[in-house]
Image (tube, rainbow, N blue to C red):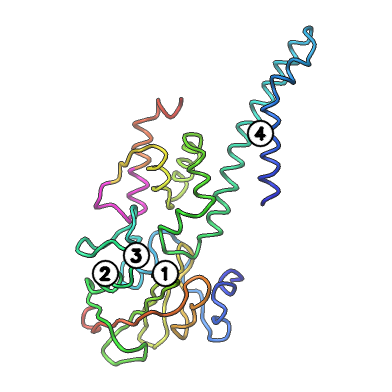
């Protein structure tokens, strides 16, 4: 698991070097530059998804037996997902479309909104529907 | 199963069995209180009885169970006409609840994981849930 994160970090640090890499490409090979950026851009998408999946896996493994919501959301991997900010939203919503889980705290933390009625608190299916309804109403914004 | 034995080392010696598939729909507190539709916890996103302080203290959990008829009792022995709940804690914080079955065995929902039946309340003591903090009971007429 740690190895996977390390590899993700390496990819990320490579991307920080893109401008320098581009300068080193000869002027007559603009096509190569475009290809370079396109390939790198697709790696960015893959890396964020991969990071989210790894963090989610770790979070579930580390908290599967817990009842304490405070401990469940305090897990370091869950906190890293929150730290991904808006980038994590599409992945969290995809997870919610698949099945209910404890994503409420992360969604409130990232969006600053709370579409869940007080009487639905604790009912994960109703909370899921509330968040998916919220996502539908914000689809233009979420699409970026 | 490996995860269960790692977290509940006494389970192998004292005995138990799986009784449900995994589900995040309810947790141990809800299961012990007889609710399979909500996740009970005094934290945003959880259900907590409105009349009970939403604090992570044993007294709040005892009060939460009082809303469904439970009151403190001496131990987890079988008493005819009563059903019991064991509350667990770790480092002074509530972690888990198990409910006694008519047979005298106990049933636990393990977080988002499975339900299990364990022969003794101490079967789920260990690094995950700590130890039994107190026992509660209510008349079976309340069920």
In magenta stretch: residue A134: no
Of mark 3 and mark 1, the one earlier in the sequence is: 3
Determine crowd level at label 2: few under 14, some 14-19, many 20+ residues with C-alpha closer than 10 A: many
Q: Residue A12 — which label?
A: 4
**Separation of marks 3 and 2 at Cα, in angstroms:** 12 Å
Measured along the vertical axis of the image, is residue B141 above or below residue A27? below
> Are the residues under badges 2 and 1 in a single subunit?
yes
Depth check: B69 or A82 in front?
A82
Residue located beneath label 2 in the image: B64
| Disc 2 and disc 4 in contact, CB within 8 angstroms | no
Q: Which chain is disc 1 placed on? A: B
Residue located beneath label 1 in the image: B95
> Are the residues under badges 3 and 1 in a single subunit?
yes
**Separation of marks 3 and 4 at Cα, in angstroms:** 40 Å
| Disc 1 and disc 4 in contact, CB within 8 angstroms | no
**Separation of marks 3 and 1 at Cα, in angstroms:** 9 Å
**Separation of marks 2 and 4 at Cα, in angstroms:** 48 Å
């Amino acid at each position: 698991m740690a190895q996977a994160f390390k590899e993700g970090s390496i990819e990320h640090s490579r991307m920080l070097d893109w401008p320098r890499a581009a300068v080193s490409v000869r002027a007559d090979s603009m096509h190569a530059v475009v290809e370079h950026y396109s390939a790198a851009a697709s790696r960015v998408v893959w890396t964020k998804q991969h990071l989210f999946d790894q963090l989610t896996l770790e979070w579930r493994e580390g908290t599967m037996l817990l009842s304490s919501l405070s401990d469940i959301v305090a897990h370091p991997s869950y906190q890293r997902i929150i730290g991904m900010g808006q980038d994590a939203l599409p992945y969290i919503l995809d997870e919610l479309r698949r099945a209910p889980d404890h994503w409420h705290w992360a969604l409130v933390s990232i969006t600053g909104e709370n579409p869940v009625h007080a009487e639905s608190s604790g009912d994960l299916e109703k909370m899921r529907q509330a968040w998916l309804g919220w996502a539908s109403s914000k689809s233009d914004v979420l699409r970026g | 199963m490996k995860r269960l034995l790692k977290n509940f080392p006494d389970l192998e010696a004292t005995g138990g069995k799986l009784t449900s598939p995994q589900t995040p729909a309810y947790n141990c507190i809800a299961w012990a209180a007889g609710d399979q539709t909500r996740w009970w916890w005094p934290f945003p996103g959880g259900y907590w009885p409105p009349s009970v302080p939403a604090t992570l203290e044993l007294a709040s959990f005892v009060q939460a169970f009082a809303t469904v008829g439970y009151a403190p009792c001496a131990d987890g022995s079988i008493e005819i006409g009563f059903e019991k709940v064991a509350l667990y804690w770790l480092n002074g914080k509530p972690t888990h609840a198990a409910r006694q079955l008519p047979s005298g065995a106990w049933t636990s929902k393990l977080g988002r994981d499975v339900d299990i039946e364990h022969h003794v309340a101490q079967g789920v003591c260990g690094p995950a849930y700590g130890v039994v903090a107190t026992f509660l009971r209510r008349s079976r007429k309340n069920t």
